[in-house]
Image (tube, rainbow, N blue to C red):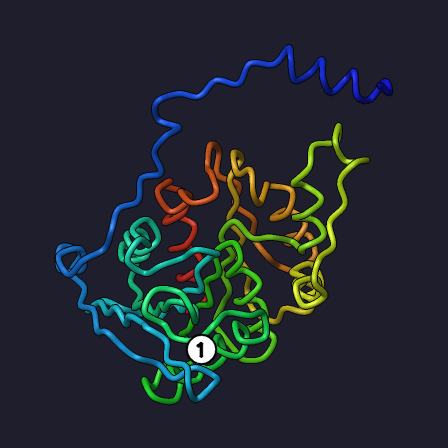
Amino acid sequence: MRAWGWLLLGAASCTTIQIGEQDAFDVKQTVDADFFQTRGATREKLRIPGADPKVSLDAWYVRKPDSRGTVLLYGGNGYLMVTAHAQLDALLKLPVDVLTFDYRGYGRSTGSPSVAALEADALAVYDHLVQELAIDPDQLILHGHSLGSFVAMFVEEERSAAAVVLENPVSNVDDLVGGLVPWLFDPFVRFEVDEELKRNDNLARAERTRSPLLVFSGTEDPIAPDRMAKAIHERAVGSEWVSIEGGGHNDLPRHPPFVERYQALLNRAL
C-alpha cells in the first residue's frame, strides 16, 4: 500500500465521528394562512405563466398595509414556499410586500428544471410582477438565497431593480465544487461540471452590477462559506457585506442583524 493509503487508513481508524440525537432531525416549519394573518399580511395565491407556454408556476403574492416596496424572492435548491418559514417571517417584519414562487418541477409548479429554464422563468416572473401587478422596478428588491443568488444576479443584468440582496451566495460553481473535497483527498477526486452550470459566475456579474448590493453570509455555513460572500462583495463597487456570527446556510434570517441591515438597505434604496 502506498504511503497515502496508509495515511488515509490511519486517519479513518483513529477518528471518531460523534452523531448526536439532534443530528437525526431536519426540522422545517410550514407556512399556512394563519402565519400571514398573525403578521398583519394577506396572501394571494397565483399561477404565473412560465417562459414555456406549457409551464405554470405556483406563486404567492404577500401584501402588507405599510409596504414601501416589493421583494422578489428567488429561493435556493430545494426551496419550497410552504417551508420558507424563516425567510418569510423575517421579510414580514419589514415594510415590504413579497412575491415568491416554486421553480418549475418543484412543489405544484409544472415542467422540468434546467439552468436555461430557471433563468427564463425568473424573467417571466419579474415581467409578470411589473406588467401585470404594476410594480415599479424602482421599488423592487431582487433577493436570492444560495442557488437563487445566481438567479437574482442574472435578472439584475437583464432588468432593473432598486437593489439586490444575496443570502448565503455562491461565488461560482468551480469554487463551490472545489470546496466540497477536503485538501487531503483532493489529489484523488475530480469533478466534471456541466458547462451550463459553469457559466453562472457571481464574481463576474458582481463586477457589472448596476444596483446597490447587500450580501449576507454566515460564519458556520459549510455550503457557501464566508469567503464566497466576501469575494462577491469585493468585486461589486459600493456593495455591503454582513457576516453573521454563528449563522448557517438556512438560518440567517433568524439572526437580528439580518432584519436590521435589510431595513437599512430599504431606507437607502426605496
Pick the residue in front: 200 or 269: 200
Location of residue 173 (image quadrant): bottom right
Crowd tier of the residue under label 1, counting other residues whose Cα lies within 10 Å: few below 14, some 14–19, many 20 or above: some
Residue 105, given in percent of the width and then of the height, sits at 42, 69
- With respect to residue 122, does 150 lie above or below? above
| Residue at x 53%, y 41% (from the top left corner) | 243
- With respect to residue 15, does 213 lie above or below? below
- With respect to residue 144, does 136 lie above or below? below
Location of residue 79 (image quadrant): bottom left
| Residue at x 76%, y 45% (from the top left corner) | 190
Residue 167, given in percent of the width and then of the height, sits at 49, 52
Q: Say which element carries label 1.
A: helix
Quadrant placement of the N terminus: top right
Q: Which amino acid, by three-letter code, is at mark 1? A: Asp
Quadrant placement of the C terminus: bottom left
- With respect to residue 138, does 86 lie above or below? above
Q: Residue 33, can we see it?
A: yes
Residue 68, given in percent of the width and then of the height, sits at 31, 70
Pick the residue in front: 116 or 256: 116
Name the residue that disc number 1 marks.
138
Task: Name the residue furthest top.
Answer: 14
| Residue at x 38%, y 47% (from the top left corner) | 253
Task: Name the residue furthest right.
Answer: 2
Task: Name the residue furthest front.
Answer: 1
From the viewer's perspective, is 29 left or right of 261? left
Pick the residue in front: 125 or 167: 125
From the viewer's perspective, is 49 left or right of 151? left
Location of residue 57 (image quadrant): bottom left
Q: Residue 69, can we see it?
A: no
| Residue at x 23%, y 74% (from the top left corner) | 45
